[in-house]
Image: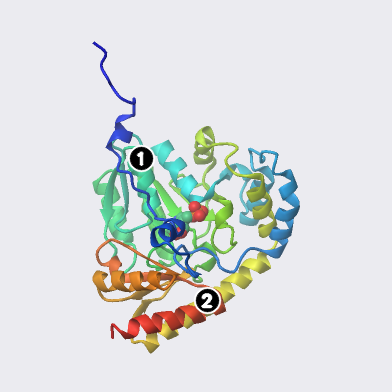
Amino acid sequence: MVLNKGIPFTEIIKSLPSTAPFVGPESLERRLGKNFKLRLGANESNFGMSSKAFEAIQKGIQEASWYGDPENYELRCCLAEIHNITPDEICVAGGIDDLLGLVVRVIVSKGTSVVTSLGGYPTFNYHVVGFSGRLSFVPYVEDRENLEGLLESALENDASLIFFSNPDNPMGTWHNSVDVQGFIDSIPLGKLLILDEAYYEFSPQGSVPPINTKNERVIRMRTFSKAHGMAGLRIGYAIANKKIISALNKIRLHFAVSRIAQIGALESLKDPKHVKNVVQKVNQGKQEYYILAKELNLNYISSGTNFVSFDLGTEERAKEILNKLQEQGVFVRMSTVPYLSRCIRITVGTESERKIFSKVFKRIYSKFQ
Ligand SMILES: Cc1ncc(COP(=O)(O)O)c(C=O)c1O
């Protein structure tokens, strides 16, 4: 008798749900049967990339038939100089999302205890579950990730890996550098903290502790997706002690980062004026969103990122308004975690996008006042 055993999936794959951490705006467009006119939900940069990077990419496209440099050498050297560290303390990969997967893979196996915030960046959780780790969640306190709670939970659950984002997504809040440094220092040896700094360029003054690659208890992650305006190129980097970086090098895909992404990122680093300019424009945009919220008597959450969370009071209301915005061609996002789900978060768009958003939002919100 021939037994039909089916496809030999691993136990982990058999147990995983078919969900993705984020539904992309393109998927939503296909579902809705129309395109969005405002893309304000993924915290991309609507201010584009450096014109110098753009030119370099245009030129470099002729070399797209070649693989990129598997060592990302030039880029790591440039980053090392900027951060006053050595190139072997840097790992370049396809964005923070890719780096999160790599770190999880080098730390997490079946049942490894991992701690994160309830409602924190979901792609991290996606990787942990995919490697059969055991997640413990710590609720936000007053719309901020709870440092004391994260530490307590890490100790209580003997976690090997802890995730914390500063400033965070989805609320846009942050902790000051003294508290973050205190948190890093309190992580016992033998545990690893991921400090996700995707919004680092937008971070309020005094919220970024100095880099110390001697410390083996922390890995920091940064990206070209936000202020550098290169989300579609997929490139980011991690900074850590070289023991951690060499572990990542054992498993990363050495040709994962495209030649074009390498060219663009390198050129963008050489054009710091662009990022400065984007940060200024985003700050201006955030002020406008705050004014809009005040005008409507709506609570908002001060943001250290490139988006602002509007507090709509309840999840039902937030969902209803988000759906209405989508019907009107405006893509924004909200958390599904209770308490955080009373908010929608709106990426800072260009001046003209903000004008349209303000008009559409006022019209929709007036029916809820
Ligand atoms: C906290 C946080 N981490 C990481 C990312 C993704 O970064 P990347 O595009 O480099 O994968 C995002 C994007 O929204 C984010 O909000």
Residue at mark 1 to residue at mark 2: CA–CA distance:
38 Å
- Mark sitting on residue 353: 2
Where is 58 relative to 127, above or below? below
Q: Position of residue 1 (x, y in %)?
A: 23, 10
Q: Is residue 224 left or right of residue 39?
A: right
- Mark sitting on residue 321: none
- Mark sitting on residue 130: 1
Q: Position of residue 127 (x, y in %)?
A: 38, 44
Q: Classify residue 4 by image quadrant.
A: top left
Q: Is residue 188 visible?
A: no
**Secondary structure beneath label 1:** helix
Q: Nearer the viewer, residue 138 or 340?
A: 340
Q: Amino acid at mark 2?
A: Glu
Crowdedness of circle 2 by 10 Å Cα count: few (<14), some, many (20+)?
some
Q: Amino acid at mark 1?
A: Gly
Q: Earlier in the sequence, mark 1 or mark 2?
A: 1
Q: Nearer the viewer, mark 1 or mark 2?
A: 2
Q: Position of residue 190 (x, y in %)?
A: 37, 41
**Secondary structure beneath label 2:** helix
Q: Position of residue 193 (x, y in %)?
A: 40, 49
